[in-house]
Each structure stands twice: as structure tokens, then as C-alpha cells.
Amino acid sequence: MGRVNPVRIGLLHPGQMGAAVGAQLVAAGHGVRWLRTGRKPESVRRAADAGLRGVDTMGELLSACNVVLSICPPAAAGDVAAEVASAAPAAGFTGVFVDANAISPNRMARIADLFAGTGVAVLDGAIIGGPPAGSSSARVYLSGPAEAVSLVSGLLAGTRAAPVDLDRRLGTASALKMAFGCFQKASRALAAVSHALADDYGVTPALLAEATALGRNALTDRDHLASVAARAWRWGPEMHEAAAAFAERGLPTDLATAAAAVFGRWNADRDAWDLGVTAALDHLRASATVPIPPPASVATPPPASVPGRPPASVPSPPAVPTAPPAAEPASGDRRPVS
């Protein structure tokens, strides 16, 4: 790995991903500091193994660094950013703050707003892949001001945490993380529920055989989604039946009922075999409540709520109904529906 001009970097915090990224930066010749106060022994061990230098206060970290990377659980992202923004003026920190956490674009905009007037450049980051170490690698997607993206990309160049410049808008990297992460993680959750049901009925070998025969990656097979919209009128009730089967075995029903709700948005596209994928995806959208921010050095966050509407909340899972039999297509329609 080639050497570069060293940059002083602050890392918050050395979890499995953070420590691995920090180790890559240290190997590239940069000094990486971390805030050790209040951290668990596991964090201390990971930081030591990665070659990170511990400091005791946020002010000490910021006064010594040009760039700060926030790599922490999503629930902690706001608190970490607020602590950095609060301490930055006194510490004289006017460098780059990279939020590389799995958060929504709207939340990213609100985090950026915390730094308004501080002189700190904010970048939106998304890490996709496993912790970069050994044969494992990751991509670090970046969006935001060009100069800051160029600086951080230079730090990561040649490491196993490869930088990818998306564009100038804050929120773009977060949107990618949400789009990919939701599919990747939700599909594994649904796979776990499906295998549990199959195990209960002794049909796991047949389930694996069908999965192997399918051989299709739903995320890469984008064009196929148009025909899914045409079939959704039939698939929705099937999902309610699946939810009932899960419930009978004490398994979670949420993913199946959520899929039924998504298919319900395509009810008007019943047997619309000439529907294009762009139109099919557009039909999934209700009224957008959060605008996509324009390119800016610090994005202006959208309002906290839409006038006339109550704040969004997460509803309790609905009761699982027994769906009535779906009407079959007219006999003259020979197109597949399963």
C-alpha cells in the first residue's frame, strides 16, 4: 500500500467496522485517534489491535484532527454528531465530518444542520461490505462538497475500504445504504422465517431445491419487477396466507403482511403486462413528504412534519386475516400468474 501525506483522523468509534476502517487508515500512514472515555474493554482491545491512539475528551480529539469519521450504530449517530458539533468551535475544528452510518437521507440532512455556522464541512457516507481486513473489502460511498469528498477519497485510496464518489448532494450515500441494506437484511430475515416454517413441516430440502432452481437475484433482475406488478393482485392474498401459516407456528408475520401491503399498491395494475418497470416503481409511491435536497455544502433539512399531517409513527402489526380466494384471470388470458 503506497504512502501518502499523513492526515490526522478522529474515529468515532472502533466497533468491528470502525476499527477495521481505522486499521486501513493507519496502514496507509495516517494517525488515527479515538475517544476512549467510557468505552467497553472490547473497544479498547479493537483500537489497540488497529493501532489507534486514544484520547480522553472530544475537545482533545477535535483539536488534533483534520477529519472525523463517525462509524457507529444508527441509533447513536445523532448523539455522536451533536457532541462533535457542540465541541467543534471551542476546539477550533473546521475540518471534515463524515457521517458514515446507516441512516435515512432526512436524518442525514438534520445531522448536517447541526454544523451550520461552525465552518465544518459535512459529508454523507455509506459503507457497504464487510469489515475491510484480510481478503474482505468494503466500499465507502461519499456524497457532498467536492473538496471534502476528494480529501476523504484520498485518505482511503489504495485501502480495502475503497472510496466511491457518488455526487454533491447530502443524502445520496444514505439513500444507497437504505436501498441496499433494506433488501440485504430484510431478505435474510424473511429467509430465516421461511426456513423455520419449512423445518417445522420437514420440507427444507424441497425449499432449498426450489431456491437453487430459481437462480434469480431479485435485486439485479430489475426489469422483472414490471411483471410482478401485474401479478400483485394475486400475490397479496398469498402473502396473507403465508402470514397465517407463520402465525400458526408462532413465527413472525410482519414481513409477509408488509409484502401484502406493498403488493396492494399495485392492485390497479392487475394483468398490465405491458407496464414498464419505471411506471411500476412509480405506482409504489404515495405522496412524497421529504424532498431530495439539491447539491449544497450543507443541505437544508426538510421540515420535521408535513403541515396538516400528524408525525409519522410505526403502527402495530395488523391482525392476520384469512384472505378470500383471489379471482382467477379470464380464461382467454394465458399469461403466467404464479
Image (cartoon, helix red, strand yellow):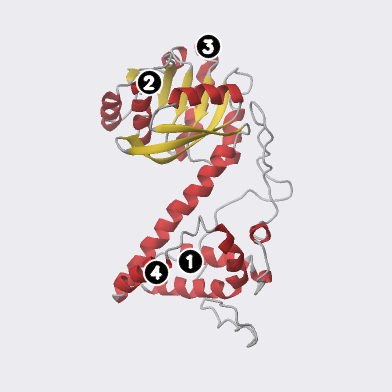
Which numbered disc, 2 or 4, marks the residue that appears first in the sequence? Answer: 2
83 relative to 263 in the view: left or right: left
Please tell me in which quadrant of the rendered image residue 190 appears.
Answer: bottom left
Which numbered disc, 3 or 1, marks the residue that appears first in the sequence? Answer: 3
Residue 184, given in percent of the width and then of the height, sits at: 44, 52
* Residue hosting label 3: 92
* Residue hosting label 1: 256
Query: Looking at the image, is 246 positioned above or below residue 132?
Result: below
User: Extreme front residue here?
Assistant: 2
308 relative to 334 in the view: left or right: right
Distance from disc 2 to disc 4, alpha carbons, whole Å, reads 45 Å
Residue drawn at (34%, 30%) of the image: 19
Frontmost of labels 3 and 2 is 2
* Residue hosting label 2: 2
Which numbered disc, 1 or 2, marks the residue that appears first in the sequence? Answer: 2
Residue 17, given in percent of the width and then of the height, sits at: 37, 35
Q: What amino acid is found at the position of numbered circle 2 in the picture?
A: Gly
Residue 199, given in percent of the width and then of the height, sits at: 30, 70
